[in-house]
Image (tube, helix red, strand yellow):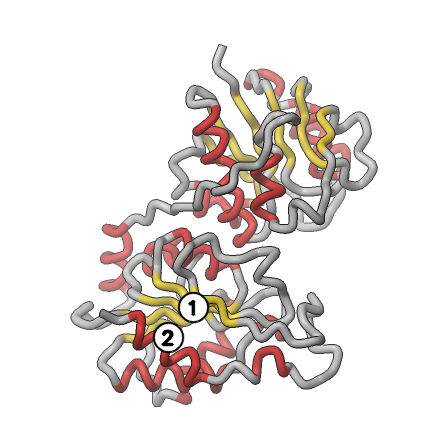
């Protein structure tokens, strides 16, 4: 009987992109298996662009809330679906309630928040050997005795190009007669992951001077920074901040030639779309959550004080970001253009 696997997915966009490496591993090792993914609703546009996923299930719970009894009732509704295994990618107690309530016999994860009983296929988490988030995800899809492969499957999102070209028209973007540079200046985690807006503007001006279009990507929360960058370029960029949903941004980014991004969910999206990518790391660690593309250019100074993983610079200077100069990034973009 073919296996049917329920994945309890992560809430962060970048982590969900990385989770596709697990989905690909499962399909490579168990070609007949069915993979369903339950995750927060905002991640579903990513899952819709992953051919390995049969069904994406939106979890109705608010971020961070336990909702114990609601999770049990929601989980009971899955009993008839015939899942043979659940793989839980997050380490919280609440994330393990649903597959337990669903009566799924094999529930695989790391122990996390003392989840004895809720998890009955407990895997050891050695952070020294499993340094990368993607390695931790993939190992949960392997047998306990199986070694992690030397080369992990890369995430690869399937963009809807027809939808992208429709968006070009509806958003009044000029005809694509020149290469497009995508800039992703946001990072929901905090300012210690955000390269300065004035630096992004310098990069944008340099690209515009060479005939490129420049598109500014960002959510509603990023509107102030995309507006600031656009003002510093005399409104010569296409400011998409707050104008696109995640699925729209994915499809539009597929039309870009090169993407410059902070360490953010969109950085991982760009890598999974096979874009030429320049990723800028500040307070975070590129050895922990690198973009999964062999040609991605990572700008990281590895100062004594980094990575600190803080939302704001505890020393007040942001040297890990401000000392990465716009000219450095611009030179990489020029080199990327044929």
Badge 1 local density, few (<14 within 10 Å), some, or many (20+)? many
| Residue 73 in view here | yes
Q: Is residue 250 left or right of residue 301?
A: left
Q: CA distance from mark 1 to mark 2?
A: 8 Å
Residue drawn 46% across the image and 31% down it: 55
Residue drawn 43% across the image and 68% down it: 278
Of callouts 1 and 2, the N-terminal one: 1
Q: Give the percent coordinates (x, y) of residue 47.
A: 45, 42
Nearer mark to the viewer, of 1 and 2: 2
Q: Are marks 1 and 2 in contact (CB under 8 Å)?
A: yes
76, above or below 186, in the image: above
Which mark is drawn over residue 278?
A: 1
Of 3 and 64, nearer the camera is 3
Which mark is drawn over residue 294?
A: none
Q: Is residue 125 left or right of residue 302?
A: right
Q: Give the percent coordinates (x, y) of residue 25.
A: 48, 33
Q: Secondary structure at mark 1?
A: strand
Residue drawn 52% across the image and 21% down it: 4
248, above or below 171, in the image: above
64, above or below 237, in the image: above
85, above or below 209, in the image: above
Determine which quarter of the picture holds residue 319. bottom right
Which mark is drawn over residue 332?
A: 2
Badge 2 local density, few (<14 within 10 Å), some, or many (20+)? some
């Amino acid at each position: 009987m073919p296996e049917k696997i329920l994945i309890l997915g992560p809430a962060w966009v970048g982590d969900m992109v990385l989770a596709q490496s697990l989905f690909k591993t499962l399909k490579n090792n168990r070609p007949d298996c069915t993979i369903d993914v339950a995750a927060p609703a905002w991640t579903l546009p990513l899952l819709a662009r992953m051919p390995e996923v049969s069904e994406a299930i939106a979890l109705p719970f608010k971020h961070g809330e336990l909702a114990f009894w609601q999770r049990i009732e929601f989980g009971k509704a899955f009993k008839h679906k015939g899942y043979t295994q659940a793989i839980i990618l997050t380490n919280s107690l609440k994330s393990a309630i649903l597959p337990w309530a669903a009566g799924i016999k094999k529930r695989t994860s790391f122990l996390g928040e003392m989840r004895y009983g809720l998890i009955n296929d407990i895997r050891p988490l050695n952070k020294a050997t499993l340094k990368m988030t993607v390695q931790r995800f993939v190992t949960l899809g392997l047998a306990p005795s199986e070694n992690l492969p030397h080369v992990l499957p890369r995430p690869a999102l399937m963009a809807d190009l027809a939808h992208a070209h429709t968006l070009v028209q509806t958003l009044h973007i000029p005809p694509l007669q020149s290469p497009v540079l995508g800039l992703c200046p946001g990072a929901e985690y905090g300012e210690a992951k955000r390269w300065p807006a004035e630096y992004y503007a310098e990069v944008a001006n340099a690209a515009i001077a060479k005939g490129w279009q420049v598109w500014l990507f960002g959510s509603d929360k990023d509107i102030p920074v995309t507006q600031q960058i656009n003002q510093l370029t005399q409104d010569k960029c296409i400011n998409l901040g707050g104008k696109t949903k995640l699925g729209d941004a994915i499809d539009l980014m597929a039309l870009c030639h090169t993407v410059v991004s902070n360490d953010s969910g969109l950085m991982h999206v760009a890598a999974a779309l096979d874009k030429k990518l320049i990723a800028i790391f500040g307070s975070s660690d590129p050895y922990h959550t690198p973009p999964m593309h062999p040609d991605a250019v990572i700008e990281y100074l590895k100062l004594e004080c980094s990575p600190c993983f803080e939302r704001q610079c505890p020393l007040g200077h942001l040297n890990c970001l401000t000392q990465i100069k716009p000219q450095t990034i611009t030179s990489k973009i020029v080199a990327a253009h044929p």
